[in-house]
Each structure stands twice: as C-alpha cells, then as structure tokens.
C-alpha cells in the first residue's frame, strides 16, 4: 500500500529524530481513512471477531535509512447472538514502511496465505 503525505513533500526525510513525531502525527490523522488496509486478519482471536474502530498510531520507530516501523492498535468485538453476550479487546499490530522524498510512504504488510 502506498500513502502519499503531501505535508512531507520537499522535506528533509533524512532526520529521523524530527521525522518520527511528524510521521506519528500525520499517520494518526489519516490512519482511520486506511483502516481497511491496516486492520489485519483476526482469525487468531476468532472467526467471529470484527473490527470495532478506534484505530490509532501508538509509535513510529526509525529502523535504518528510510525504513520505519508503525506500531498501531485497534478494537475488536464479537457479538455472540445466540447467548446475547459480547466480547471485546484491543489488537496491537506493527508494519514496516519506507519514506520517500516525494512524501510517499510504502507499507509492507505481512499477508499470510490461507
């Protein structure tokens, strides 16, 4: 997935100490618009688990060069209609991405084959 942040165009992307908080702020601002890409398979919780919102960027970590890691989390819920009960929790995920000088962020989501 590619996300273009016009706010980063023509910026020095080499200074990770300055870029980390800026990336966190910008990704937190836009992540809800891309929740379909960020929300991963929840079958490890249950086949009935569904995304329940509240996606947020927890941290941005500089790894090396223009490679970063985004730590994020979101809520899940299961409505057991037969028993009238509900379960809920929060998932924590990580994704690596690169920052290009044109403001493009290239995310590398791990996709498991079924």
Image: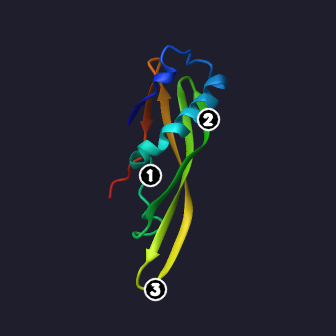
Of mark 1 and mark 3, the one earlier in the sequence is 1
Task: Give the foreground label among 2 and 3.
Answer: 3
| Kind of element beneath mark 2 | strand
Of mark 2 and mark 3, the one earlier in the sequence is 2
Of mark 2 and mark 1, the one earlier in the sequence is 1
Above or below for 84 versus 88: below
| Kind of element beneath mark 1 | loop
Task: Give the foreground label among 1 and 3.
Answer: 3
Above or below for 27 versus 103: below
Residue under the image location 44 percent in, 36 percent down? 107
User: Position of 50 compared to 63: left or right?
Assistant: left
Horizontal and vertical percent position of residue 41? 41, 57
Q: Residue furthest left?
A: 114
Horizontal and vertical percent position of residue 11? 54, 15
Instruction: Classify mark 1: residues with Cα within 10 Å, few (<14), some (14-19) or many (20+).
Output: some
Task: Identify residue for label 2.
Answer: 61
The circle on residue 106 is none
Above or below for 108 versus 90: above
Task: Identify residue for label 1.
Answer: 39
Q: The C terminus appears in which quarter of the rendering?
A: bottom left
Task: Give the foreground label among 2 and 1.
Answer: 1
Nearest the viewer among 31 and 70 is 31
Q: The N terminus appears in which quarter of the rendering?
A: top left
| Kind of element beneath mark 3 | loop
Task: Identify residue for label 3.
Answer: 83
């Amino acid at each position: 997935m590619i996300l273009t942040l016009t706010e980063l165009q023509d910026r020095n992307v080499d200074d990770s100490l300055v870029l980390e908080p800026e990336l966190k702020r910008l990704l937190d601002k836009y992540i809800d618009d891309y929740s379909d890409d960020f929300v991963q398979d929840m079958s490890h919780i249950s086949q009935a688990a569904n995304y329940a919102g509240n996606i947020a960027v927890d941290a941005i970590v500089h790894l090396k060069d223009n490679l970063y890691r985004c730590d994020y989390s979101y809520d899940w819920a299961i409505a057991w209609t037969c028993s009238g009960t509900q379960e809920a929790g929060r998932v924590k995920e990580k994704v690596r991405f690169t920052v290009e000088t044109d403001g493009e962020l290239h995310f590398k989501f791990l996709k498991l084959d079924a």
